[in-house]
Amino acid sequence: MESLKKNSQFQKVYKKGQSKASKYLVVYWLDNKDNSSANRYGITVSKKIGNAVVRNKVKRRIKEILRKWDDNNYIKLNLDIVIIARKPVVNLNYHQIKSDLKSLLYRCSLIKG
């Protein structure tokens, strides 16, 4: 699982990509042709959500969900995906975040099958 690291990579996905949102998460995605068939992920959690401990907890949960799905080829390939957490996400547990992310990716047509 590769990650988006530079601000320019995030900005490219925001400007040229598509997006969908739920109450808890926002997903931006963009086809990436020059990316050797691996997806790249970026996770954004604003300071408005909470202190560093809370933000890192949310990021770790989302990363773990994406890692499992990426290992099982659950998500379509050659994509740059940015996930933004919204404030109400702090009240969710791992399984609720997983369910919300799954339904959001399904609405974006990013899930195989």
Image (cartoon, helix red, strand yellow):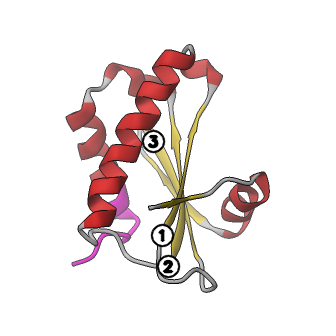
Residue type (three-letter) at the residue carrying disc 3 = Leu
* Mark 2–mark 1 distance (CA, rounded to whole Å): 5 Å
Q: Earlier in the sequence, mark 2 or mark 1?
A: 1
Residue 90 as seen in the image, left or right of residue 49 = left
Q: Residues within 10 Å of mark 3 (few under 14, many from 20)?
A: many
- Badge 2 vs badge 1, beta-carbon distance below 8 Å: yes
Q: Callout 1: helix, strand or loop?
A: loop
| Label 3: which secondary element | strand
Kindly identify which residue carries mark 2: 78
Label annotation for residue 25: 3
Q: Do the residues labelled 3 and 2 touch (CB within 8 Å)?
A: no
Residue 1 point in image, percent of width and height:
44, 61
Q: Is the magenta stretch mostly helix, strand or loop?
A: loop
The CA span between labels 1 and 3 is: 19 Å
Give the residues drawn in magenta, as a range: 104-113
Q: Position of residue 12 (x, y in %)?
A: 73, 64
Label 1 environment density (alpha carbons within 10 Å; few <14, some 14–19, many ≥20) = many
Q: Nearer the viewer, residue 106 or 80?
A: 80
Q: In which quarter of the image is residue 64?
A: top left
Residue beneath disc 1:
39
Q: In this view, does 66 lie to the left or right of 14?
A: left
* Residue 111 included in the magenta stretch of the image: yes
